[in-house]
Amino acid sequence: MAVRILTLVGSLRSGSHNRRLAEAAVQIAPEHVEVGLFEGLDTVPFYNEDIDAEGSVPASATRLREAAAEADALLLVSPEYNGTIPAVLKNAIDWLSRPYGAGALSGKPVAVVGTAFGQYGGVWAQDEARKAVKIAGGVVAEDLTLSIPESVVRFAELHPVDDPEVTEKLAAVVEGLAARTAATV
């Protein structure tokens, strides 16, 4: 049976470099790993405990939780907005952290990668995502990282899947996450 990795992208823009990086992860996944891209983060309302009650949970939040629960691990792909994590990705982490102590992230291996316009490739946002995931109960793969700087220039005419350096490093993250998952099962 294949290891299932759910990918959440912190950018909603259809042509975003981070979305393309996530697409590359789907395309380069080895045969024993199934990388799925979650669609619909833009429909998940901001976390509000008032609506996170039996019979009131929005369908989009339920779908996110179910997808994460069915996955063996998660791959978060984050741009950097004003030096930190995008709200849509933080919101997904908040929904997945509940119910407290038993959320869909609880005990699951999680890796965070991304690309950004700046010279550091979004490391601040990725660090913030790791921090939030860890607090939410996920098992952060601290050693599985990929920060690609200057995305606007690097990917101006090149999809990440066509960049050998990126695909090699991204493949190492996917393989490492799959191995980490196998070790926790």
Image: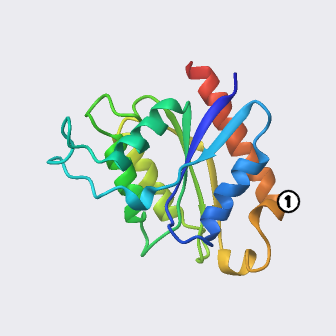
Left or right: 158 as drawn, with respect to 23: right
Against 88, residue 178 (above or below) is above
Residue 162, image x, y percentages: 83, 63
* Residue name at image x 82 percent, y 64 percent: 163
User: Residue sitting at 26 percent across and 34 percent down?
Assistant: 99
User: In which quadrant is the N terminus drawn?
Assistant: top right
Where the C terminus falls, by quadrant? top right
The residue pinned by badge 1 equals 164
Whether residue 150 is visible: no
Instruction: Say whether residue 8 is left or right of residue 85.
Output: right
Which kind of residue does numbered mark 1 sit on?
A: Pro
- Quarter of the image where one finds residue 45: bottom left
**Residue 64 location, quadrant:** top left
The chosen color scheme is rainbow
Give me the residue at 29% from left, 29% from top: 101
Helix or strand or loop: what does disc 1 sit on? helix
The quadrant where residue 90 appears: bottom left
Residue 9 is situated, as x and y percent measured from the top left of the image, at 53, 57
Mark 1: few, some, or many residues within 10 Å (few <14, many ≥20)? few
Near-viewer residue (43 or 103): 43
Residue at image point 76% right, 50% down = 27
- Would you say residue 20 is visible in this rendering? yes
